Image (tube, grey):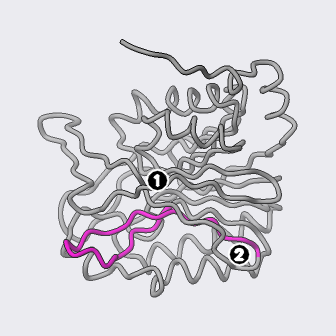
């Protein structure tokens, strides 16, 4: 399956972001991609709760979701929306960070809410509390497609290998890890974490990412690392998109998964153990 990763640099304006994303999806489809992936928070990147409350919508009313479902139908392609920031009915007003797998008929095949929240102290001046604005998901999700069994995840999930082991043992042969990865932690950890998830689960890893400095109407701009990656089941980096906005293409071959799992069948070697 010819696959396209979109590397974006979104703002906190969903309409502005959509006007960039749709033409890129059309370009990727015109180049022959049958599976197109976007990064985390494709619709809006913001940490301003008041601004998010003003511009975000529930799933049923989200313009980005509706438009990308329509594009999947128009181009007859599969689309993995890395994630959308969405309003929920939570009493505390927290949002959902939700990924969607869209079929060529526009139907939502699978939804996944990000389980692990990015609550970290990168430095004395740079802290993040994702759980203050977003509520964590509770369910691992496997999306069935004609070309792969796709284990869905989002960004910070990549640091929790048990999630991916569970997905692989349930049949995943492709792992999606869309991200808006912090530029500091990205430089240190992005490549080794993604390659490790591919190697230990002998699965493709597809990680479309946000990149660059993101314009905000209020507050300081945020920077993300970029370097959207595609990694083979043997751990080879098949695609590294660097820091620019753009489209990257890669071919998925199920035979490469089979070959890697025959060479190192580690998924059949898990053992229960006791202690310490």
- Quadrant including the C terminus: top left
Q: Residues within 10 Å of mark 2 (few under 14, many from 20)?
A: many
- The vertical placement of 81 against 270, above or below, is below
Question: Is residue 188 located in the magenta-colored stretch of the structure?
Answer: no
Reply yes or no: does residue 98 show up in magenta.
Answer: yes
257 sits to left or right of 24: right
Which residue appears at 76% of the width and 69% of the height? 77
**Of residues 192 and 98, the one drawn nearer to the viewer in this rendering:** 98
Which residue is the site of mark 2? 72
User: Earlier along the polypeptide chain: callout 2 or callout 1?
Assistant: 2
On the picture, is 77 further left or further right than 155? right
- Image coordinates of residue 103 in percent, x first then y, are 72, 71
Q: Looking at the image, which residue is at 79% across and 68% down?
A: 30
| Residue at disc 1, secondary structure | loop
Observer-nearest of 137 and 38: 137
For the view shown, which residue lies furthest in the right direction?
255
Q: Residue furthest front?
A: 274
Q: Nearer the viewer, mark 2 or mark 1?
A: 2
Displayed quadrant of residue 198: top right
Picture coordinates of residue 251 (x, y %)?
A: 80, 46
Residue lying farthest to the top in this orientation: 276
Quarter occupied by residue 85? bottom left
The secondary element bearing badge 2 is classed as: helix
| Residue 71 falls in image quadrant | bottom right
Residue that mark 1 sits on: 210
Using the numbered discs, state the Cα–Cα distance from disc 2 to disc 1 in whole angstroms: 21 Å
- Magenta range: 83-104
Tell whether 60 sits left or right of 93: right
* Residue drawn at 21 percent across, 76 percent down: 91
């Amino acid at each position: 399956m010819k696959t396209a990763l979109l590397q974006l640099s979104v703002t906190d304006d969903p309409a502005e972001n959509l006007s960039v994303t749709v033409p890129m999806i059309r370009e990727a489809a015109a180049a022959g991609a049958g599976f197109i992936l976007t990064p985390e928070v494709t619709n809006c990147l913001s940490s301003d709760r008041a601004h998010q409350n003003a511009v975000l919508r529930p799933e049923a009313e989200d313009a980005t979701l509706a438009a990308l479902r329509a594009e999947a139908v128009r181009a007859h392609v599969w689309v993995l929306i890395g994630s959308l920031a969405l309003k929920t009915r939570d009493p505390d007003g927290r949002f959902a960070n939700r990924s969607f797998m869209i079929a060529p008929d526009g139907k939502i095949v699978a939804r996944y809410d990000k389980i692990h929240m990015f609550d970290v102290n990168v430095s004395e001046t740079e802290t993040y509390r994702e759980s203050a604005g977003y509520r964590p998901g509770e369910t691992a999700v496997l999306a069935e497609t004609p070309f792969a069994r796709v284990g869905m995840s989002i960004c910070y999930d990549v640091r929790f290998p048990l999630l991916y082991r569970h997905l692989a043992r349930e049949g995943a042969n492709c792992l999606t890890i869309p991200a808006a990865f912090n530029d500091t932690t990205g430089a240190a950890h992005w490549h080794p974490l993604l390659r490790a998830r591919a190697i230990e689960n002998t699965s493709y890893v597809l990680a479309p990412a946000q990149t660059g400095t993101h314009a905000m109407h209020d507050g300081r701009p945020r920077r993300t690392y970029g370097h959207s990656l595609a990694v083979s089941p043997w751990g080879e980096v098949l695609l590294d998109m660097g820091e620019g906005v753009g489209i990257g293409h890669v071919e998925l071959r199920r035979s490469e998964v089979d070959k890697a799992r025959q060479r190192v069948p580690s998924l059949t070697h898990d053992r229960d153990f006791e202690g310490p």
